[in-house]
Amino acid sequence: MLLCALFRYNLEETAPQVIKMPVYVVGHRNPDCDSIVSAIVYAEIKNLLEPGCSAQPVRIGPVNGETSYVLKKFGFDVPLLIQNAYPQVKDASLDPAITVRKEESLFQCWQVMKKANAKCVCVVDDDNKLCGIVTTGDIAREVLSRLPLDESEFEDSKRSGKRVPLEVAAGVFTEDQDIKTFTLDDPISEVQEVMRVFDYKQFPVIDEHGQPLGIMRRKHLLERPSKWFILVDHNELSQAVEGLGEAKILEIIDHHRINPVQTDQPIMFVNYPCGSTSTIIGKMASDKRLTLRPESAGLLCAGILSDTLAFRSPTTTEQDIFQARSLAERAGICLEDLWREMLTAGSNIDGMNPRDIIRSDFKEYHIEGLKLGIGQTMVHGTVPPDVIRQVQEEMANLAEDGRYDLLVMMLTDVQASGSLILWHSQDPSLIQEAFAVKSRTHFFLDAVVSRKKQVLPPIIEAIRKKARRLKLNS
């Protein structure tokens, strides 16, 4: 079930989920301003509307100059950087770590296990550092190894609780064998490999100080532990965090073309043809009669201005303008002043590494079996020839390293209302047909400032035309 909400949705109609673990709210790779701020504010909204939810904004790439300025202006930290979405030990439902001191008796240990209904306990020292583990099987073997005991000896052992010291049983693990432990950050794939090699049933999970946090068992792998995500400002797998296929997607909020990742169950999918994801989130907040903090409203203003180029982009809608003005009033800011500040912070590429220029706002697409990437950055005035040359050289390197069939870089001058287009491809006909140009290096497109609406669509059409011709000729 795919719900494309046209600003007519009701969050109460979506069955609430019991949230027991972190929910990561994340934008696309190589995030732009809208991607970062929409993740921050939606995580805030999620936590306000759903008590017990632990939504956390994260990112999967460095923030650009414009975004850094906006976060600092409104008093927000840069979201946590994550490398992938692959499940880790922290994502599993671990058994609790029941601990006993190593000086305690075996009988006392057994009493602790019975009370906690645990099949194993962690033996710790005075610093609560793991020394070993004792299982019910260890206790049984230790007692049986000391038979025959007459009835009086056995009863005396039970009463005193000191007949068999605990360290004797724990010694099976602390002296004769290594204790196989995991940490919360260990990937589940590594856990599976260790469990294939070692025929243990319980594996302690410890922190950086060696103190036990829980017990990992084979049954936990059968429960398919995974991270939980809410995607904002994207819905395509090629733009998402690595390993998303092994994660659980709870929601998607986006304003781009729909080429969505697959989910195992119905989710809330909000997709609206406006200029910014920040617009959608602002509308969701107002529909819920939720009063955002002035700082959060300011962030969303910045996201809208960034993605719509201060309403100059053809993607701009009346809803973008309405939300930006409403949010600016709540934030107590002037939109024109904020845009000038953002433009100054984000359009200076002097001294930037060529790859950083390309990657500052870069999106990857897969069309008809071809892999293409389109980057965009703001510039002010004429771009120096040496910068053009350096970026083109880096595009050639990136195309080879990433096996891209086509790379396009938009150097957009908002004041001139146009973009300098740099490109690299082994097949020049794609660009030449898409934009009716003959240039093999770069060219300027007047009044072209939107990747989503003015650059990507003609490239897709050129690719599909070529695919149709090849099919007819085959």
Image (cartoon, grey):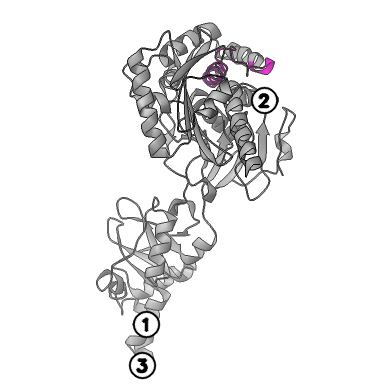
Percent position (x, y) of residue 267?
66, 43
Give the magenta-colored segment's residue range: 295-320
CB-based contact (under 8 Å), mark 3 and mark 2: no
| For residue 262, side relative to residue 406 (left or right) | right
- Front residue (pair 81, 328): 81
Label 1 vs 3, first from the N-terminus: 1
**Type of the residue with mark 1:** Arg
Residue sitting at x 67%, y 17%? 317
Which one is closest to the eye, mark 1 or mark 3?
1
Residue 281 placement: quadrant: top right
Is 168 drawn above or below residue 8 in the view shown?
Answer: below
Which one is closest to the eye, mark 3 or mark 2?
2
Identify the residue position indicated by label 3 in the image.
Answer: 150
Q: Is residue 185 visible?
A: yes
Identify the residue position indicated by label 1 in the image.
Answer: 141
Q: Residues within 10 Å of mark 3 (few under 14, many from 20)?
A: few
Assign a secondary structure to mark 3: loop
Percent position (x, y) of residue 391?
37, 23
**Type of the residue with mark 2:** Pro
Q: Residues within 10 Å of mark 2 (few under 14, many from 20)?
A: some
| For residue 39, side relative to residue 144 (left or right) | right
Identify the residue position indicated by label 2 in the image.
Answer: 273
Label 1 vs 2, first from the N-terminus: 1
